Image (spheres, grey):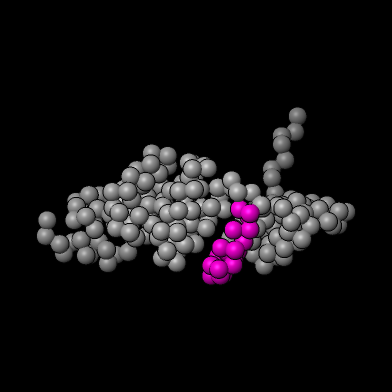
């Protein structure tokens, strides 16, 4: 018996393009093509396909989220926010969209709004590692170090090698003056391939403890 044919992304893209030729108003096909194009880094073409997906299937909330991700990638946080908010209007229980909104607010330094949306995302899906890590970052911004550490511990329990959680914990312990623990967790972040700024390690090295 022949083994299963190995998946080839370029063949998949070609198949989708052929399907769209036969049914150009198939919004889901345009969406699937966009996701495949994102997979190979063709963001410009992916954006065009997502716009077509929304044109043909206005209630396809995942398309708004993907389009928002491309907007975020270009630094257009406002458009990213609007697209994810539109996704929630369509499907209020879409946890990823709430998480993305929280992430945008965190990037803009609006910690309270970030926390509100990230907590909502996690109430809908407690397994969103990125949402919980961003929530920890938002608590760090608000100097709520115990809460930051608590959320990071939950992340590490779920994903033991998730370096950003170790990094957040390291920063929280640094701010709390617990320098040995700060070094421990920052080193764990580095061991898991997180690019810890050298100036932070130098800053700790100069402290007396």
Q: Nearer the viewer, residue 106 or 161?
A: 106
Q: Nearer the viewer, residue 40 or 182?
A: 182
Is-magenta flag for residue 148? no
What is the span of residues highlighted in magenta in the rendered image?
Answer: 70-89
Q: What kind of secondary structure does the magenta stretch mostly adopt?
A: helix
Across and down, in percent, residue 90 comes to 66, 52
Q: Nearer the viewer, residue 76 or 12?
A: 76
Which residue is depicted at the point 33% across and 59% down?
Answer: 142
Residue 144 falls left or right of residue 45? left
Q: Quadrant of residue 110?
A: bottom left
Q: Nearer the viewer, residue 73 or 124?
A: 124
Which residue is depicted at the point 59% across and 67% down?
Answer: 79
| Residue situated furthest right in the rendering | 22
Across and down, in percent, residue 139 comes to 35, 55
Can residue 21 be seen here? The reply is: yes
Which residue is depicted at the point 42% across and 39% down?
Answer: 158
Q: Quadrant of the N terminus?
A: top right
Can residue 30 be seen here? The reply is: no
Residue 167 falls left or right of residue 110? left
Q: Quadrant of residue 171?
A: bottom left
């Amino acid at each position: 018996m022949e083994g299963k044919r190995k998946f080839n992304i370029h063949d998949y893209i070609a198949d989708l393009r052929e399907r769209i030729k036969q049914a150009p108003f198939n919004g889901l096909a345009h969406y699937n093509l966009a996701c495949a194009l994102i997979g190979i880094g063709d963001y410009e073409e992916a954006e065009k396909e997502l716009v077509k997906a929304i044109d043909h299937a206005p209630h396809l909330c995942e398309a708004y989220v993907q389009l928002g991700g491309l907007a975020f990638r270009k630094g257009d946080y406002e458009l990213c926010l609007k697209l994810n908010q539109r996704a929630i209007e369509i499907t209020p229980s879409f946890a990823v969209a709430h998480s993305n909104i929280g992430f945008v607010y965190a990037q803009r330094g609006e910690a309270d709004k970030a926390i509100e949306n990230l907590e909502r995302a996690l109430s809908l899906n407690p397994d969103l590692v990125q949402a919980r890590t961003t929530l920890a970052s938002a608590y760090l911004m608000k100097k709520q170090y115990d809460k930051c550490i608590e959320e990071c511990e939950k992340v590490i329990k779920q994903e033991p090698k998730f370096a950003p959680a170790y990094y957040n914990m390291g920063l929280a312990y640094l701010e709390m003056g617990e320098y040995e623990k700060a070094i421990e967790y920052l080193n764990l972040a580095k061991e898991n391939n997180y690019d810890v700024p050298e100036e932070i390690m130098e800053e700790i090295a100069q402290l007396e403890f």
